[in-house]
Image (cartoon, rainbow, N blue to C red):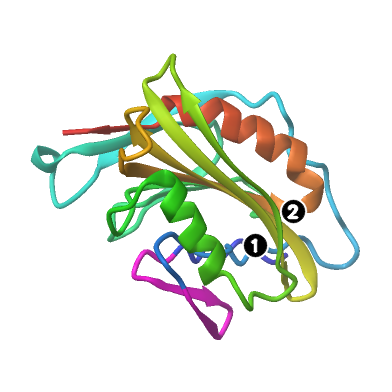
Amino acid sequence: MKRIAAVLATSGVLLLGSAGVAHADTGSPPMDGGCGGGYVGDALATGLHYRYTVWDASAGPAEGSLGIDAPRGWSFVRTPQAEGRFHDPTGNDLLSLREPTRAATPAAAMSSQVRALAGTPGLKVLGQHVKVMDSLGQRWATLAYRYSNMGEPRIVKERWIAYGTDSTDQAVMVVTVAGRVMDGSGLDALLAHVSPTAQLAG
C-alpha cells in the first residue's frame, strides 16, 4: 500500500517525487497514494470525530503555539518547521496546519500559489475564493486544485487565514487538506470543520 509522503515543503520548493517545482510559499501537492492491487477502499467519511491538538509554533512554548481540531485516530507529526501534519490510518488523506513562510494577504498568497503550481502534472485549478468570516473576525482565501501523482488524480484544498477582515490583513496560518478525488466530500467537511478551530497563539 502506498502511503502519503506529505511533502508540504515550507522552504519555497515544491517536491513532487523527484521532480522539483518552484513554489511561492505553501507547500506542495502532497504525494498521496492509495492502495495497490485494484483495492480502492471507502471514501473519507463526512462525520468524523475530532480532538483539539496543540504544538509549539517555534523553538519553545514561549514563542507561541499552533492548534487545530484534528480527526481522532489520525497520526500526528510536527515538522522541524513547526508544521503539524495529520494522516488518516489508510495513508490516503492529509490535514496540515502551519504558518506562512513569508508575509502576504490571503488573496495574494493564493494567487502566488497558483502561479507556482504551473507545470504540475495533471494540474486543474478547481476554484479560488476569498471570504470574510465576520463571526470569526477573519478573512479566508481558499484554493482547490487537482493534480496527478503517479498517474492517479489527487485533490488539494489550501486555505490562508488572516486575523482581521480587511483586505490588507496578512495571512497568519495555512490549513491544507488533501486526498483522493473520491474523498472530495469528506475533505470539504474536514476543511469546513477544522478551519474555524485553527489558532495561532503567542
- Quadrant into which the N terminus falls: bottom right
Q: Tell me: 96 left or right of 2.
A: left
- Residue 168 in percent (x, y) is at 32, 40
Q: Residue at x 45, y 71 (%)?
A: 23
> Can residue 92 be seen in this snapshot?
no
* Among numbered discs 1 and 2, the one appearing first in the sequence: 1
- Residue 8 in percent (x, y) is at 47, 62
The image shows residue 36, relative to residue 61, as above or below, that is below
In the rendered structure, which amino acid carries the disc numbered 2? Arg
Instruction: Say which mark, if any, is on residue 77.
Output: none
- Residue 152 in percent (x, y) is at 79, 68
Q: Tell me: 148 left or right of 195.
A: right
In the rendered structure, which amino acid carries the disc numbered 1? Asp
The image shows residue 192, relative to residue 83, as above or below, that is above
Q: Tell me: 102 left or right of 198.
A: left
Q: Residue at x 74, y 32 (%)?
A: 45
Residue furthest out toward the right: 38
190 magenta-colored: no
The residue that disc 1 covers is 32
In the image shown, does 80 or 173 lie closer to the viewer? 173
